Image (cartoon, grey):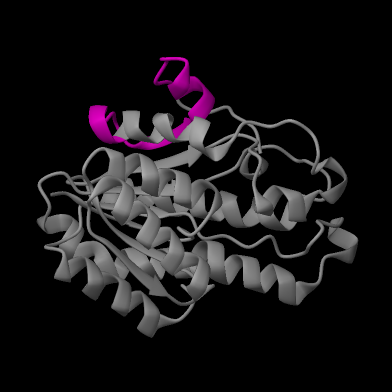
Amino acid sequence: MPVAMITGGSKGLGRALAGALAGEGWDLVLDARTAGVLEETARELSGRYGTRVVAVPGDVTDAAHRADLVAAAGSLGGLDLLVSNASVLGAEPLVRLDALPLEGLRRALETNVVAALGLVQEALPALRASEAGAVVVISSDAAAEPYPTWGGYGASKAALDQLAAVLGEEEPGLRVWAVDPGDMATDLYAAAVPEDADASRPSPESVAPAFLRLVRERPAGGRYAAPALLEGAAGQGGGTR
């Protein structure tokens, strides 16, 4: 069976993607910082879909943890898809740049960019060995548009987009996609903008089919917006936070 690794896989978009892939017969390696929630997610998905799901709790900024994730994929037979979903905001709630703690920005860059690249580096031998190796990084419209208070988070996602674009050029044997999932009802968004937490937004589960389309159809690498994929147009760009 194909094997996918998803960081930030215990809830929100990560969990939704894990469920969608498990439903297609994928085995999974899931990462998150909160062990109890992650292990419960792994048990639930394995029981529902009958696939192998390995929970590896830890922090993606830890090099030893990243090595453990790749080793777990190896125990399942290899790695075909890496989904870099783990993210931090840099400030909760989000604040203007004149009030953004520099340590918060460092944390966002370390988690959203540096750790993502570190995991790609660790996983590249396994991804290159796959007949259909692919990398998905979770982007944001804040990477491309200047929304007030989203500057630090958006800067980290813009850097991640650029890393993904260059990786696609340097690794022509892989598919590398940056995907803007659009606004969703997640804990991350609620923490970012608490005053909007009660507004109606799409669920992560409603967005997951866009990612399945990428995996099934394997279009050219690049930046995609989930709403466009859901509408049936595999065009690049656009989207929302």
Query: What's the residue at 62%, 31% (across, down)?
Result: 202
Taking depth in this image into account, of 41 and 79 the one nearest to the observer is: 41
What range is drawn magenta here?
215-235
Does the segment drawn in magenta span residue 221? Answer: yes
Does the segment drawn in magenta span residue 118? Answer: no
Query: What's the residue at 51%, 46% (across, down)?
Result: 13
- Position of residue 31 relative to residue 13, above or below, is below
Taking depth in this image into account, of 192 and 34 the one nearest to the observer is: 34
- Position of residue 12 relative to residue 61, above or below, is above
Image quarter of residue 177? top left
Describe residue 69's horizontal placement relative to residue 131 as left or right.
right
- Does residue 19 appear in the picture of this structure? yes
Describe residue 5's horizontal placement relative to residue 97 as left or right.
left
Taking depth in this image into account, of 25 and 105 the one nearest to the observer is: 25
Place of residue 181 in the rendered image (x, y in percent of width and height, measured from the top left) = 54, 37
Image quarter of residue 223? top left
Query: What's the residue at 17%, 49% (across, down)?
Result: 2
Query: What's the residue at 53%, 45% (across, down)?
Result: 139
Describe residue 26's horizontal placement relative to residue 185 as left or right.
left
Place of residue 231 in the rendered image (x, y in percent of width and height, measured from the top left) = 47, 15
Place of residue 95 in the rendered image (x, y in percent of width and height, measured from the top left) = 85, 57
